[in-house]
Image (cartoon, rainbow, N blue to C red):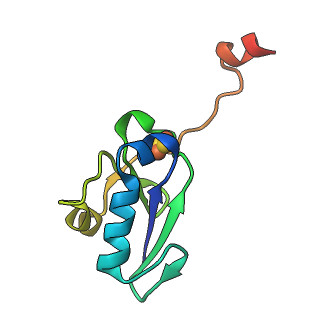
Amino acid sequence: MKKIEVCCGKSCSGMGSRRILDFLIAKLGLKPGEENDTMSLNTSPCMGYCARSPNIRINDDHFIFGANVKNVLSDIEKGGKYVEPQILDLTDDFLNDLS
Ligand code: FES
């Protein structure tokens, strides 16, 4: 089962994620929140990779950056690119400056 999430944050929306979501809804026959035997489709708030918008996340830790309608189905089939989860370092000097 592939868990597909389309980012609908401001940056991704501005870069066309809604168009990609509409395309996936039509091609997969799924609405956000639905699943079939092989996939689930959902939207997501900002994923934290706005500079690479529009983005799709697969199974929580794989991404399609700069997704587009032309390639999105084959990119989903390939499974996306693994991205190490971001862990917030609370000892970071930047955060200490905020306190
Ligand atoms: S709005 Fe999509 S990653 Fe930030």
| Left or right of residue 65: residue 11 | right
Toward the right, the furthest residue is 99
The correct choice, above or below, for 77 with respect to 14 in the image is: below
| Left or right of residue 33: residue 59 | left
Q: Quadrant of residue 90?
A: top right
Residue at position x 47%, y 77% from top?
31
- As rendered, which of 92 and 53 lies closer to the eye? 53
The correct choice, above or below, for 12 with respect to 79 in the image is: above
Residue at position x 33%, y 46% from top?
65
Residue 89, percent across and down? Answer: 65, 28
* Residue 63 is at least partly visible in this image: no
- As rendered, which of 27 and 57 lies closer to the eye? 27
Residue at position x 70%, y 21% from top?
91
* Residue 65 is at least partly visible in this image: yes
Toward the bottom, the furthest residue is 37
Residue 1, percent across and down? Answer: 42, 79
The number of numbered badges drawn on the structure is: 0
Residue 98, percent across and down? Answer: 75, 15
Residue 8, percent across and down? Answer: 49, 53
The quadrant of the picture occupied by the C terminus is top right
Residue at position x 25%, y 69% from top?
77
| Left or right of residue 67: residue 38 | right
The correct choice, above or below, for 76 with respect to 51 in the image is: below
